[in-house]
Amino acid sequence: MPGTQPENGECTRCPIGSYKATISNTLCTACPGYTSTLMAGATLLQQCGEIHTSFVCTKMCPSVVDLRSRPSNDEYCCSS
């Protein structure tokens, strides 16, 4: 089902910061660059939008990270 991915034998919604438009057993695709989705379960690339400092995302982050103090390797997309 679009907007979902397999996880532990179940279909779960694509996490915030990703999307999937197709019906397949593949994982959701991460939004490009400094974009993210507002909610889990996105089905279109167009649902990825620019991240603002008040936006909170949970994209595989060990903890919430403020965009203003983003690590130099730019691997996080979280903000408090």
Image (tube, grey):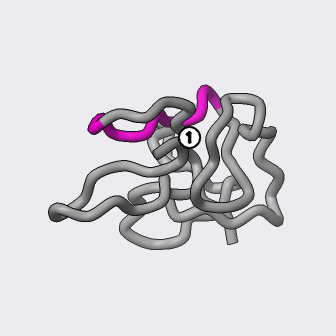
Write the residue at 54% across / 47% down: 3
Q: Describe the element under mark 1 as helix, strand or loop.
A: strand
> What is the x, y in percent for residue 51?
76, 47
Pick the residue in front: 77 or 32: 32
How many callouts does the rendering have? Answer: 1
Q: Is residue 35 above or below residue 15?
A: above
Pick the residue in front: 9 or 78: 9
Q: Is residue 18 above or below residue 12?
A: above
Is 79 placed left or right of 72 in the picture?
Answer: right
Which quarter of the picture shows residue 60? Answer: bottom left
Pick the residue in front: 60 or 47: 47
Write the residue at 70% across / 37% down: 35
Which quarter of the picture shows residue 69? Answer: bottom right
**Label 1 belongs to which residue?**
19
Label 1 Cα neighbours within 10 Å, binned few <14 / some 14-19 / many ≥20: many
Q: What's under tag 1, amino acid-wise?
A: Tyr
Write the residue at 33% across / 39% down: 27
> What is the x, y in percent for residue 41?
58, 55
> What is the x, y in percent for residue 5?
36, 49
> What is the x, y in percent for residue 19?
56, 40
Magenta stretch: give its range. Answer: 25-33
Write the residue at 43% across / 35% down: 23
Pick the residue in front: 10 or 47: 10
